[in-house]
């Protein structure tokens, strides 16, 4: 069964939406959760397919995983019995590489299928490997897999050649129980790096400087149990904030950390939206015509690459010509061909999109090329005239919890329907026409 989203555009998104826990924080934290020999409880997990995949992976090496409810899980890693991770489910997710750091750090041995993930360009792992080697590990690449092992891990001084979220977290994982002190320079500063460090520190690790570009990790002999709550998802929140702007709506994103959303809020204000902030909520109102701007994706605190497709979609409906430059991933503009089918006027030159605003989109058949671009196409459909059909939505379900339900809660007209079920599709069309 292949599901698609069927969307009838034209209703502004209005109301409040609860933001789930951050997928990109939860993934490394779940890998890290196998490192203590005592039980850890993790709360505020997003209920999305990437999380299910990593839970299956840690179970497959012997961790005991108990679901307490949809967003809470209990994990005990005292009986890790295998160091190899394989399987179709894990090939699809990028975050499988965190199991390398976690297993290497705990049992000094890890073999994981080469990380997959969204197809947004070449995604090397040379900095991860360099980091492991800097702690004294050997790394081999046997046929589509990564094998890392060490007799003993010792703290090292690791300089990252590129700012990498994944490599920074992996070196943290591999070094928390190494002998001596590790220093990571040119570390990534994303909120989820701070979250991983906070989680490990709550298990007794000694990590200082997370959130700055120098992180110091003093190895400890063992980690103990904890209870930990994942931070809110910055990108999910940003997607709904842009959804408000794209549909000329009025949305309050709730349970967020407004500081993590600053680069997103700043751009929306620059374009003419009203943005109001509370302790744990942000409201976006788009009542005026939107203005052009330029954006360049950068590591945190810069504008996130995971918000780039949403940004391009919004600029395609704003007055004047804008430029979006993608500096993190090579081929992250594949969705532009889909947006063009909806009437967008965008040309790509190298790593830049030149966008000339149009009055509005028209509904079309489009395909989600990856997770974030898929979400952007749904937002485009919500603003378009007529019906939009988005397929390949399994990408979207990797990272957005109950996407269509949350959108309906804001007044958007959207239904998840089996692509072959013409009757259900017609029923929805009748209902919303
Ligand atoms: C993570 C996120 C992804 C987000 C990205 C940037 C997860 C599961 N994924 O991906 O959603 O878009 O951060 O915020 O959390 N690089 C190297 N060598 C390496 C590692 C990375 O050259 O060893 C390069 C990459 O090609 C890219 C840049 O560094 O150009 C940043 O990549 P990185 O921060 O590592 O992204 P991911 O961890 O893959």
Image (cartoon, grey):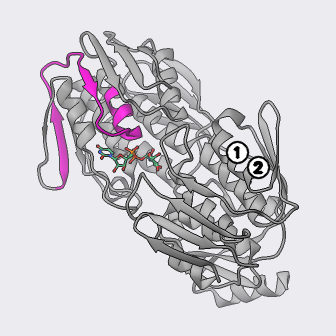
Is there a contact, CB below 8 Å, between mark 1 and mark 2? yes
Crowd rating for badge 2 (residues with CA inside 10 Å; few <14, some 14–19, many 20+):
some
Residue beneath the point at 59% across and 45% down: 46
- Up the image or down, 307 lies above or below 233; here it is below
Residue assigned mark 2: 269
Left or right: where 273 falls relative to 98: right
Q: Determine the image quadrant of residue 250.
A: bottom right
Left or right: where 58 falls relative to 421: left
- Up the image or down, 309 lies above or below 67; here it is below
First to last magenta residue range: 144-171
Left or right: where 295 falls relative to 259: left
Q: Nearer the viewer, residue 325 or 123?
A: 325
Label 2: element kind: helix
- Provide residue 323's location: percent of width, then percent of height: 56, 63
- Provide residue 5's location: percent of width, then percent of height: 64, 74
Say whether residue 307 is visible: yes
Image quarter (top left, top right, bottom left or bottom right) of the C terminus? bottom right
- Provide residue 51's location: percent of width, then percent of height: 49, 47
Residue 280 is one of the magenta-drawn residues: no
Residue assigned mark 1: 266
Residue beneath the point at 65% across and 83% down: 343
- Up the image or down, 96 lies above or below 180; here it is below
Residue 157 is one of the magenta-drawn residues: yes
């Amino acid at each position: 069964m292949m599901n698609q989203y069927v969307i009838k555009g034209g209703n502004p998104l209005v109301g409040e939406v609860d933001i789930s826990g951050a997928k990109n924080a939860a993934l490394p934290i779940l890998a890290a959760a196998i490192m203590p020999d005592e039980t850890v409880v993790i709360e505020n997990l997003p209920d999305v397919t990437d999380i299910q995949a990593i839970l299956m992976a840690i179970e497959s090496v012997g961790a005991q995983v108990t679901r307490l409810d949809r967003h809470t899980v209990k994990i005990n890693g005292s009986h890790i019995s295998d160091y190899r991770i394989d399987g179709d489910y894990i090939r699809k997710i990028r975050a499988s590489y965190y199991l390398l750091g976690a297993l290497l750090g705990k049992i000094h041995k890890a073999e994981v299928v080469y990380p997959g993930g969204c197809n947004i360009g070449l995604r090397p792992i040379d900095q991860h490997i360099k980091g492991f080697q800097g702690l004294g590990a050997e790394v081999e690449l046997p046929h589509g897999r990564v094998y890392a092992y060490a007799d003993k891990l010792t703290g090292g001084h690791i300089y990252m050649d590129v700012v990498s979220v994944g490599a920074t977290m992996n070196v943290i994982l591999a070094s928390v129980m190494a002998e001596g002190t590790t220093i990571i320079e040119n570390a990534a500063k994303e909120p989820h790096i701070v979250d991983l460090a906070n989680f490990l520190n709550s298990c007794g690790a000694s990590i200082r400087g997370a959130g700055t570009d120098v992180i110091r990790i003093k190895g400890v002999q063992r980690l103990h149990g904890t209870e930990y709550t994942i931070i809110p998802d910055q990108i999910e929140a940003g997607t709904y904030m842009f959804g408000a702007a794209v549909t000329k709506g009025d949305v309050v994103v709730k349970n967020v950390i407004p500081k993590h959303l600053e680069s997103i809020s700043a751009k929306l204000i620059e374009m003419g939206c009203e943005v109001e902030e509370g302790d744990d909520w942000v409201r976006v109102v788009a009542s005026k015509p939107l203005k052009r701007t330029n954006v360049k994706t950068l590591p945190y605190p810069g504008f996130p690459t995971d918000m780039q497709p949403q940004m391009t979609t919004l600029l395609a409906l704003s007055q004047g010509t804008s430029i979006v430059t993608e500096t993190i991933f090579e081929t992250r503009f594949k969705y532009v061909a889909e947006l063009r089918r909806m009437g967008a006027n965008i040309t790509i030159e190298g790593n830049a999109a030149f966008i000339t605003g149009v009055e509005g989109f028209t509904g079309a058949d489009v395909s989600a090329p990856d997770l974030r671009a898929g979400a952007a196409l749904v937002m485009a459909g919500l603003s378009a005239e007529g019906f939009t059909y988005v397929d390949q939505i399994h990408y979207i379900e990797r990272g957005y919890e109950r996407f269509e339900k949350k959108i309906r809660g804001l007044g958007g007209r959207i239904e998840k329907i089996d692509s072959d079920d013409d009757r259900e599709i017609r029923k929805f069309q009748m209902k919303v026409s």
